[in-house]
Image (tube, grey):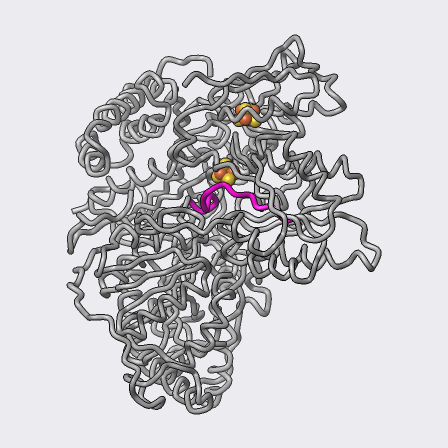
Amino acid sequence: MSMDREQKEGAEVLLMGNESIARGALEAGVRVAAGYPGTPSSEIIETLSRFSEAGKLYVEWSTNEKVAMEVAAAASFAGLRSLCVMKQNGVNVASDFLLHLTGSGTRGGMILVSCDDPGALSSVNEGESRHFARLMEIPLLEPADFWEAKEMTRWAFDLSEAIRNVVMVRSVTRMSHASGNVVLGPLPAVTAKAQFLCDGPVSDPDRGPVTSAPVIQKHRLQQEKLRKAAALFEDSPFNTYEGPETPELLIITSSACTLYSREAISLLRAEGRAGILKLGTTWPLPPALLKRHLRRTEKVLIVEEVLPFLEDQVKILAAEQAREIGIKTFYGKNDGTLPMVGELNPDLVAAAVGQILGIDPPAIPAEYREKLRALTAALPKREQTFCPGCPHRASFWGIREALQRDHRGGFVCGDIGCYAMASLFPAAGFHTAKTLHAMGSGTGIASGFGKLGPFGMEQPVLAVCGDSTFYHAAIPALINAVHQNADITFIALDNSGTAMTGFQSHPGLDVNAMGEASPKVDIAALCGAMGVPVTIGDPFDLIGTRVTLNRLLEEPGVKVLILKQSCALSPEKKVKKRFLVRVDEALCRGEACGCNRLCTRIFRCPGLLWNRERKKAEIDEVICAGCGFCAGICPAGAIRSEEAAK
Amino acid sequence: MTEHLTKDPYNIVITGVGGQGNVMASRVLSNMLVRKGFRVTIGETFGMSQRGGSVMSHIRVSPTAVWSPQIPKGMANLIVALEPIEAIRVLADYGNPSVKVLVNLRAIYPVGVITGEDEYPSEGKIRETVAALAAEARFLAATEEAIRLGNPILGNIVMIGAVSGLGVLPIDRELFETVIREWMPAARVEANLHAFAIGQAAVALKSPLPQREV
Ligand code: SF4
Ligand code: SF4
């Protein structure tokens, strides 16, 4: 279910927050959109790619977020409206360019959309991108519902053109991946011709070269732009108040926390006592608006995710205005009223409001609660693991066997993608992957470990990296390792797609985000050009992987192994099983298999069942993807595979 | 004109395991309700849904207001479980004495059960637990019915039909047909209508579907 071209202006439809943001950009006449996939942001570019059309809307998945922002900036310099989209930590990647871009200013309206992930529902950090708005001195908007996400994105382009700088729109998982009613607006006919006017003097914002120098002048100008935005924010319709004229408690909030705050007041029936100042323009804060509201109350609770960003700004304004508004009592993150980590929800906010106002949140009857506790304990957990037939499981099994035979305590530096599960859940990576940080960092860290030999480190160092991650950030790290002559074995887990986020295109594929044929950049050829030995293998060839790895682990310098096999969920694999696999009960050693029942307890492919009654392993034909790999791991040769008929 | 709801907001949890069509079910149901003039919020977590985890959608339905994408604890009005132990997992957090629960009896074993480390509760135990915690509990062999229609994924539509049969929301077969026709190739509409009708009849007749071993 997603927004499509057929849906007409005026229709009220259910859109995901991300679809609504995309729609807002379309209604603003966006011409160029670029991004890098990352949950919870990916659906914005995906939606736009369905509307792409030569000369009307260009959409790309860029190699990384910095490049995406540069691509979008070029369109702006040429007078077109543009959008760049990323998840929270992507803004870190783009930030060096952003620092200079915000100094140089923009021409056609340009929006940076960042989707944060409070609670790290699909991330290995809960980094907050809002701080970048302040750091980079650009305006920040935060939508608080699905419809507003569209309206705000649309308006952000006008604002960007009014101040000639980038405007940041920040969403969160619970906004981006939630859905609600949205009324569609018209899609404008866009005709502006792309032209980069650059024959004027540096001081001419319309015709001069675009640069952040002369720095002091440009920086001063940038701050004037920000003041102009603050002035516009004073009567922005995105800032609203609901509640009594003089509330006993004023809640100041933004984004999804607005909905939690509303729910909390309703749960506590505190409508007559607490009011909500919902801010859509969260940096810079409009001082007069804040003053008007702070004046009418003694107690202020700031509800936001994750760090006290609003809270700090509100306190600064309150201190500056203390003479006129009086002294306030503040509640929020700093005093521990709300947790400083993780995402919020209606219950946490209700507890906070209840504590301040002395109201108990509604509770379910004690008797039922007891029954619940007794009856729902001890449910089997759903552990996350690689899909049945996933090539990563096979790759890590091969690495495990090679490291076991090597005996020197070798380890893998992990990276971001499905294969991060190997680092997150030790059982999934068979206890081989031991570090996990940013995109491409596994290779950089390995490069560092690989220079510790002279300090006495004897452990072999491996790095794994997926195909999309390779292009994104691993290339500079790998070149570093080569140039520094670090002792590492670099393994590219090439499954032909950005599997983790839903098969977006990347430079290794022959198709782009708009579905057009495009040249691919070959990982093996790139590594070869770095002058290091490259071996290509199939992760499903267990013996091949193990033998190759054991050889590479003995050699000095950088060695590259590319394990190539497409993702089990890739369209061509979902159609048909390659092997028919079964367990020969007579050969299966059952409980006597090593000390471990290797196949089910250690290897753990969900296609392999342990039959409790018969005490034997078994293949679940519905779940097994037919990769055939497990036939090679059984020490008794009990798992049999035969090529499926064509 | 919007029709009457027993609660404002009316809170629905649809739960299951990645790959069961949970997201599709919540969108079909929500789209039907939007067409009826309601404000609907769906909250989803599906970042890791492809890899065996539990998937849950929260649906808030209101004649007037936009509610949070997370239902407060203990405040579900209806739980639709595409997988039996997920019904119990959701009850633990969102259950209350007046909640209604629809359960598809087809189990999907977690990895720990597959590997023999954990034990999956028996069907009898599941029925007993859900019945003890719900004001109304219905058990369906939705996946089996769907397999007979030619595709196990249609189990989610059987369950949406069951929601309609329960009579707590103003949704019927005609509305379902309008919504489904919009996003499905015509060839698949018929099977979906069948699946819906099966679920609807099973619950409306107050007699559960024939029970088979699961
Ligand atoms: S989506 Fe693909 S790469 Fe990711 S776990 Fe599943 S099979 Fe492996
Ligand atoms: S063949 Fe073995 S490893 Fe491959 S999917 Fe089936 S059970 Fe899993």
Residue A48 makes an appearance in the image = yes
Q: Which residues are magenta?
A: A490-502
User: Is residue B203 rendered to the left or right of residue A471?
Assistant: left
Instruction: Please indicate whether residue A606 sits to the left or right of residue B150 in the image.
Output: right
Q: Horizontal and vertical percent for residue B58? A: 39, 43
Residue at position x 20%, y 56% in the image: A184
Identity of the residue drawn at 30% across and 24% down: B199
Q: Is residue B103 above or below residue A79?
A: above
Q: Is residue A116 above or below residue A245?
A: above
Q: Residue A121, position in %: x, y?
A: 51, 50
Q: Look at the image and say whether residue B6 sits in the magenta stretch.
A: no
Regarding residue A268, the answer to whether it shows in the image is: no
In the depicted view, which residue is nearer to us: B83 or A508? Answer: A508
Q: Position of residue A488 (x, y in %)?
A: 69, 51
Image quadrant assignment for residue A593: top right
Measured from the top left, where is residue A547 in percent x and y? 69, 34
Image quarter hosting the N terminus of chain A: top left
Magenta stretch holds residue A499: yes
Depth order, front residue of A351/A471: A471
Q: Is residue A600 left or right of residue A273?
A: right
Q: How many numbered badges does the structure rendering display?
A: 0
Judge by depth and name the residue closer to the eye, A405 or A141.
A405
